[in-house]
Amino acid sequence: MSEILQSLLLAVDQQLQSAQTPYVKKTYDRLLTLGLSDDAAREEIADCLGEEMDAILAEKRAFSEKNYRTLLDRLPWNETPDQGNDLQNLTI
C-alpha cells in the first residue's frame, strides 16, 4: 500500500470520528449496507478525498466540501477488478 493511500485512509478514519464530517460516516454506513467491506468502503472514500486533493492542486483552489460531498454521493464507483485502484500504484 502506498504512503499516499495510507495518508488518505488515516484522514478518512479521522473524518469518520469527527462531528464536523457526519456525511463521511453516512457514506461509510451506506457503503457497508450495500455489501462493501470495511476496507473497501474506506478505500472508496479515500478515492474521493484523493480526487478532491488532485483537483485542489490542478485548479489551485481551496478544498471544496461541496465537491467532496458530490463525489461521496456518487459512490460506489463500481470499478471492475481489472481497473483496480490507481492510488494503490502511486509511489512517492
Image: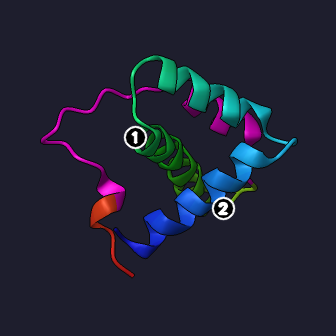
- Membership of 73 in magenta stretch: yes
Q: Secondary structure at mark 1?
A: helix
Which amino acid does the dot numbered 2 rest on?
Lys
> Residue furthest toward the top?
34
Residue 76 visible in the current orientation? yes
Residue 74 visible in the current orientation? no
Q: Nearer the viewer, residue 65 or 82?
A: 82
Which amino acid does the dot numbered 1 rest on?
Ala
**Image quarter (top left, top right, bottom left or bottom right) of the C terminus:** bottom left
Near mark 2 (Cα within 10 A), the count class, few <14, some 14-19 or many ≥20, is few
Span shown in magenta: 63-87
Quarter of the image where one finds residue 44: top left
Q: Secondary structure at mark 2?
A: loop
Question: x, y percentage for residue 28?
Answer: 58, 32
**Image quarter (top left, top right, bottom left or bottom right) of the N terminus:** bottom left
- Membership of 24 in magenta stretch: no
Q: Mark 1 — residue?
A: 40
> What's the residue at 71%, 55% (across, down)?
14
Which numbered circle lies on residue 49? none
Quarter of the image where one finds residue 16: top right
Relative side of 26 to 39, left or right: right
Question: x, y percentage for residue 64?
Answer: 73, 44
> Residue furthest toward the right?
19
Q: Mark 2 — residue?
A: 60
> What's the residue at 51%, 49% (across, down)?
46
Relative side of 91 to 44, left or right: left
Camera-nearest label, 2 or 1: 1
Near mark 1 (Cα within 10 A), the count class, few <14, some 14-19 or many ≥20, is some
Q: Earlier in the sequence, mark 2 or mark 1?
A: 1
> What's the residue at 68%, 34% (across, down)?
25
